[in-house]
Amino acid sequence: MIDLFYWPTPNGWKVALMLEELGIPYQIHPVNIGQDDQFRPEFLAVSPNNRMPVIIDQAPADGGPALSVFESGAILKYLALSHGRFYGQTVRDQAQIDQWLFWQHGGLGPMAGQTHHFNRAAPEPVPYAIARYTAETRRLYGVLNTRLTGREFVAGDYSIADMAIWPWIRRHDWQGIALEEFPDVQRWYATIAARPAAQRAVEIGADWRDRNRTMDDADLAVLKAAAGHG
Ligand SMILES: N[C@@H](CCC(=O)N[C@@H](CS)C(=O)NCC(=O)O)C(=O)O
């Protein structure tokens, strides 16, 4: 059983997508980042960078004790390696996947995240920041489009690289990007959006924001039990 500490954002969706693709049992718990759940000491004990998502694997494949993992890319790799799926067959395959996984974590995610912030959450308009981050996000869409030209998926078969990137493209409207301008991204995006696992992943906790769901005692108990197992 996997416990997933989660909020419905691109970094949360990518792990939900992987868990849905694997079809393994998991339980979701809120990390309401608008209500500072990420700063609770019980959460910081498993996620010292005060960010979600985090998983706690209660029955790791190595037979060892429960294990907590933070950073969504590390979580995707951990799940892929534990289950032998969505991470190619060879070191060569994995090098291809890792390039695009790291590209998302070092580039698309941080840049698109800043674009979201300056377009939607900044207390006052900052035109220079909007222009800078939108231009960089647009450049990254161009890179992805070129990569996907003549390819069905980003790196060989459907993999954790696609799962990491797709949720960020789902927010293209927040980034001021028209997908029609990037036809291979648009085609790839639609292919993944049609997967039942992707449809389920974006429904998970979809009403939590409206309900202002925060961690309760049961959620905190799971965290307390996992402290020291990262
Ligand atoms: N590199 C991290 C980024 C995680 C991240 O930025 N999570 C955001 C929500 S999408 C968060 O928890 N923010 C809380 C905060 O900024 O205090 C990952 O991939 O897991």
Image: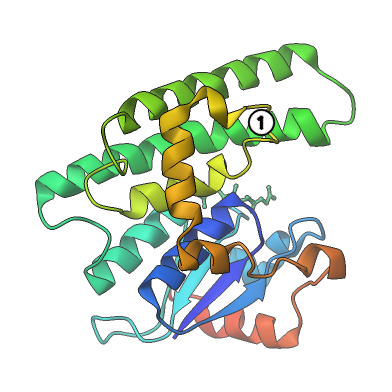
> In what quadrant of the picture does the C terminus appear?
bottom left
Q: Is residue 230 above or below residue 106?
A: below
Residue 72 at x, y percent in the picture: 47, 55
Query: Image point 42% across, 53% down: which residue?
Result: 163
Judged left or right of residue 54, residue 163 is left
Query: Image point 33% across, 33% down: which residue?
Result: 148
* Residue denoted by label 1: 175
- The colour mode here is rainbow
Query: Image point 82% across, 60% down: which residue?
Result: 35
Secondary structure type for disc 1: loop
Query: Image point 55% across, 64% down: which residue?
Result: 199
Residue 140 at x, y percent in the picture: 47, 25
Residue 121 at x, y percent in the picture: 82, 36
| Numbered circles on residues, count | 1
Q: Is residue 179 visible?
A: yes
Question: In the figure, residue 116 lies in which quadrant?
Answer: top right
Judge by depth and name the residue closer to the eye, 40 or 1.
Answer: 1
Question: In the figure, residue 136 lies in which quadrant?
Answer: top right
Q: Is residue 48 visible?
A: no
Residue 87 at x, y percent in the picture: 24, 57
> In what quadrant of the picture does the N terminus appear?
bottom left
Name, please, the residue furthest toward the right.
Answer: 124
Q: Amino acid at mark 1?
A: Gln
